[in-house]
Amino acid sequence: MIDERDRRRVIAAMTIGIVVMVAYWTLWFTTRSVVASNTTKAYYDFENAFPLADGWLTVCLVGAIATLRRRASFSVFWLLAGGGAGVYLFCMDALYDVEHGVWFKNAGGVIELAINIITLVFSVWLLRWAWTRRRALLTDG
């Protein structure tokens, strides 16, 4: 059985993740200078490749929230898909940032580093949370 506080905590964390992602992309497409760590065309092209992948991550998090609230066993799928998507996004983003020295160029780079770290920590935490509770999640409800 999943502890109710535990369930609410993971739902809250996923909700915060969704809010941050929506805020980031809203700023990217309306006031890019607030979140951009670089102004080159290559960087803009790279970042512009992420909305679909972040959209998939958002779908996974929404699916996980909905199924966790309903105590549906399908929540295991959404939690693992979301955690995996987050790790994949971290890997893509971090590799670009390391190859192009983004992290320590300016304040935007430090923000980028923070986003990368948060993405990795949250994604691994979500994967671990789901995996260690998979039996309870599959029989929940």
Image (cartoon, helix red, strand yellow):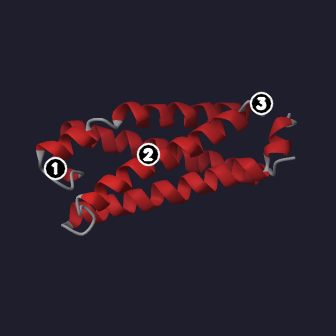
- Residue bearing the label numbered 1: 33
Mark 1: secondary structure: helix
Residue 4's spot in the image, x, y percent?
A: 78, 49
Left or right, residue 135 beside residue 51: right
Give the foreground label among 2 and 3.
2
- Residue bearing the label numbered 2: 89
Of all residues shown, which one is farthest toward the front?
99
Kind of residue sitting beneath label 2: Leu
For residue 32, say whether it is visible: yes
Name which residue lies at 64% across and 35% down.
78
The residues bearing labels 2 and 3 have C-alpha atoms spaced at a distance of 27 Å
**Sequence order check: which comes first, mark 2 or mark 3?**
3
Q: Nearer the viewer, residue 113 or 92?
A: 92
- Residue bearing the label numbered 3: 72
Mark 3: secondary structure: loop
Q: Nearer the viewer, residue 69 or 133?
A: 133
Residue 36's spot in the image, x, y percent?
A: 21, 51
Name which residue lies at 85% across and 43% down.
135
Name which residue lies at 47% across and 54% down.
119
